[in-house]
Amino acid sequence: MTVEVLLVDDEPLVRSGLRAVLGSEPDMTVVGEVGDGADVPDAVSRLRPDVVLMDVRMPLIDGIAATRTLVSSAEPPKVLVVTTFENDEYVYDALRAGASGFLLKRSPPEEIVQGVRTVVRAESLLFPASIRSLVRSYGTTRQDDRVARLTEREQEVLRLMAGGLSNAEVAAALYLGVETVKTHVGSVLAKLGARDRTQAVIVAYESGFVSPG
Amino acid sequence: MLGGALFTPYAIFAMIVVPLAVPSLASVDSVALFVGALLLVAATIVVTSRVPLVRTIEASAVPSLLAGPATGLVLPPGHATTARRRQAAWFVLHLFVGAAVSLASVVAPPLSLRLLLTPWFGAPSVLPGVPAADIAPGWAVVLGPVLLAGLVAVTAGLGWVAAWLAPRLLGPDQADRLAALERRTAELTERNRLARELHDSIGHALSVTTLQAMAARKVLDRDPRFAAEALAAIEQTGRAAAADLDDFLGLLRDEASARAPQPTLADVEALVASHREAGLPVDLEIGGDVASIAAVVSREVYRIVQEGLTNVQRHAGAVPTRVWLVATPDLLRVEVSNAVPGAGRLTVADGVVLPARRARVGSPGRGGRGLEGIRERVRLLGGRFSAGAESDCWMLRVSVPTGGGPR
């Protein structure tokens, strides 16, 4: 199965660079590119990509607003924020708006490609340490009783997810089958109202269930 | 003591002037004469305290004379009337108290010694207003040391009072402090803004460079044409970022060395030479008597040329460029023009020129900051400014009055 990618960045040089990097992978195709968040909904409904690589700062509609719009649509693609700076408040805002993870523009090509694969497979969290430091810098603590609705096992799974463990690693840590872990992850996401691991982990941090410190 | 020493010339002045002004000294009550002389001295001191040199002497003397509490004494240039009054008050007080202390320290030691010797030589007759016979020998023996101790105590006390008073009378007042604080805050805010802009601009350039290099490496064999384009993009981005960096450091340096000699049009050849060294083919043409232009105009126009050339390097790269400077008796005209590599790269709107590629809303004005600086300088000089594409070149035109204009 080929992963179809849409590139969103107002800098043509970033788009052409990413296109060359992703396009040379056998399992990836860049199906299109746009220069502003305003053009995203149209391009997505036309091209139906699996992943959108989204710049944060753009002239008309920025990556945060575009992500929010996209996530609320039917069958949204995964959104990966592409950023120049790691410790950027906007990146955190984009994650809270529903992005599944982020990539640094300076990452080596293998990491960029791997990042896209990780997000599509949704089996582990992208850059757990960076997400933790983002929560530490910009996260706000809020009362949230959704975590309390999780069973003890599900809470254990969530804790390990926040640590960046993949389904297979969680399974090994808890002496469970991978399929069982997948079931747990599914019910954690459902109970937290999260669309993916990243969103679930943000809830875990912000509710104080897991400490980002 | 310095106060006493400084007091002396004033006292001598009064001693000369008073007899001249009051012809028959004998007819005037001696107390009234004394008070009048003191008032004259005070008035003279107040008048002279306005002399800047006197203020400077006080300002430099006070911190060294007063130990401890006087530290942090920052003397404002005495611009405000209240500040001047406070300084005059301090000067008068300093001189009078100094004179009194000086007088006392000259009189008291021998007097106390003489008092100690009362049992053998009889009471001294020098105590003003106290007849010699009224002092019992026993009391006189006690009074001697007490007088001396009193002098030491009073002098020390006055020193302490002076130390307490000095910062209040000589130091910056509330308004001065507030203004200094505001200046400092504005400076820091500006520095922060610059730092953020620098971070954005260089960060952006570096990630573009990295991505393009990455892409070029990936497709080198398969698509050498793309690789070549990527290399060209890397080159240009790197050059623009270096120019940006230069600019930012220039701004920071401007702030730091505002008092250092600024380059003028006399240095414009060196400026052009440095751009040539950096790979920009620049032609320089100077006409008229540029050397006799007002210094302020010369400095600002140098900056304008500098920003113009930096803009060329940043936006157009190493393209043929021409700097043209002509001075007439009342007008200085400047043109910086360069060939435009590839059409449609520049958009002209409202006089502000933003290269299309770099016009990012996320960082407003980034592409046009150099031009904004030029516009602001020209406005201050009361001149005219235009920038834009003209046929196949890009032209920056500035004309300013050579006299300096409204400022």
Image (cartoon, coloured by chain):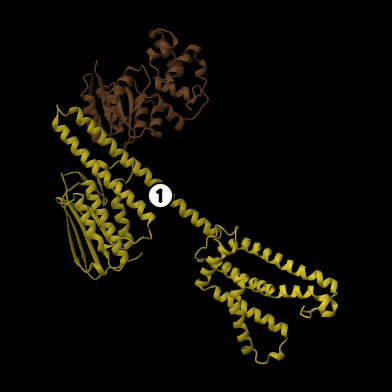
Chain colours: A brown, B yellow
Q: Is residue A5 above or below residue B169?
A: above
Judged from this view, the residue extending furthest toward the front is B120
Where is residue A36, by image quadrant?
A: top left
Residue at 48 percent of width and 54 percent of height: B182
Quadrant for residue A174, please give it: top left
Q: Which residue is mark 1?
A: B190
Q: Position of residue B130 (x, y in %)?
A: 81, 78
- Residue B144 seen anywhere in this rendered image of the structure: yes
B296 to the left or right of B1: left
Which quarter of the rendering shows the C terminus of chain B?
A: bottom left
Subunit ID for the residue under disc 1: B
Q: What is the quadrant of the N terminus of chain B in the image?
A: bottom right
Q: Which is nearer the eye, A194 or B229?
A: B229
Q: Position of residue B329 (x, y in %)?
A: 24, 71
Residue A10 visible in image: no
> Residue type at mark 1?
Glu
Secondary structure type for disc 1 = helix
**Which residue corresponds to the image point at 17% horizontal and 36% vertical from the top-left?**
B229
Q: Position of residue B379 (x, y in %)?
A: 32, 59
